[in-house]
Amino acid sequence: MSPPDADTSAGLSEVDLERSLKASGVGDKAASSYAVPIVDLSNPDETAVADALWDAATTVGFFTVVGHGIDEESIDAQFEASREFFEQDLAVKEAASPFESALNSGFEHMKQVRPSTGLPDVKESLQVTARADAMSGRWPPKPADFEARTRAFMTKSHALAARILTLLEPRACPGQARGTLADAHTLWGPDGQCTLRHLHYPPMSAERVAALPPGSWRAGAHTDWCCVTLLFQRTGEFGLECAANPRTNSTEWAPVDPVPGGVAVNVGDMLSRWSDGRLLSNLHRVRMPAPNPGTGEVPVRYSLAFFMQADKSAMIQCAEQPPITAGDYILGRIRSNFEK
Ligand SMILES: O=C(O)CCC(=O)C(=O)O
Ligand SMILES: [Fe+2]
């Protein structure tokens, strides 16, 4: 399908794919156990690292990086900030960081409706988009150093995502100067769109889970909108699953379990488009785990997702689709997930 113009072409096929899961049955299939690759970024042989990333990105599309250089203390501190924010009352969180879908920022509680399920994810999230106007009036006052801590964590996440993009770029976008992808993503500039999403999947009793509408997921199957996502998980908190990318024609799902010292990475739709499909984004979802037999409760899950999204004005130039600004591209995807 060749879209008629740039504005309406943003992410249409991805939304159709997600909607089709509702009817296909693929969405209900249990996860099997093929392994998500692990890539060690501390290997001094840069060619070997680039090869391993390319293999991982073109087969599964989801992989875990270790030796990535982000210190454990910063990751733990961000999770702690997230926990302190979410433990407040709902009304306090809503007032502290009002959600604004057009800015992709703020706090939302069970508001994100996935096209794959037609139901809200059973989660709450706090999104920080690295642009001054997006966060004006949205920095939560508690914990007290939330803004400083989050800015520092986003700086480290951005550097890691930029390194991964630069290692993938020569094969993903062979016609473009090396560094174009990383340079298109700035933090805190007037056009910035990189986002850190703090996610909280609340613990709940088996009765509350049973009362949810049938077909509810912690996060319904979806692809991400960005170039790459860094997904930070805590040990012992499971449920993330991915489908291999569409090139493999596989309908299997694999668990993406937390790896000590590891960060999960996935390719998003923006990079699929930018690379003319040399890289493909893949579906992933977060399963509602079985209640703990001792407590009868479904355990809590926290995660942090850093979405490396090109600046609003960055032009996504590729051969097979019309040029589109990254700003228009993201807006199209937001509209497909949020009512307002
Ligand atoms: O919480 C997770 O592990 C996944 C979250 C996710 O995929 C997303 O927010 O896009
Ligand atoms: Fe995602």
Image: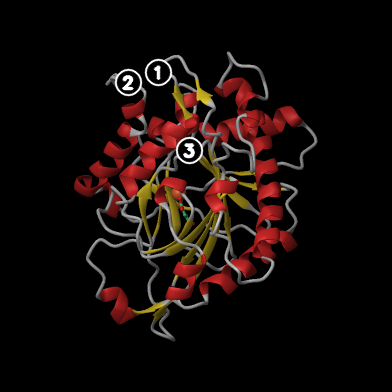
Mark 2 Cα shell of 10 Å, populated few (<14), some (14-19), many (≥20) = few
* Mark 2 residue element: loop
Q: Which residue is mark 1?
A: 322
Q: CA distance from mark 1 to mark 2?
A: 7 Å
Q: Nearer the viewer, residue 257 or 187?
A: 187
Q: Nearer the viewer, residue 210 or 338?
A: 338
Q: Which residue is mark 2?
A: 5
**Residue 156 in the figure: left or right of residue 194:** right
Judge whether 19 appears above or below 167 on screen. Answer: below
* Mark 3 residue element: loop
Q: Residue furthest left?
A: 23
Along the polypeptide, which appears first: circle 1 or circle 3? 3
**Residue drawn where x is 68% and y is 57% of the image:** 261
Mark 1 Cα shell of 10 Å, populated few (<14), some (14-19), many (≥20) = some
Viewport quadrant of the N terminus: top left
Task: Please state which of the two labelled residues, at mark 2 or mark 3, is closer to the viewer.
Answer: 2
Along the polypeptide, which appears first: circle 1 or circle 2? 2
- Quarter holding residue 54: top right
Q: Say what amino acid the circle numbered 2 marks.
A: Asp
Q: Which residue is mark 3?
A: 268
**Residue 146 picture location, percent across and down:** 65, 64
Mark on residue 206? none
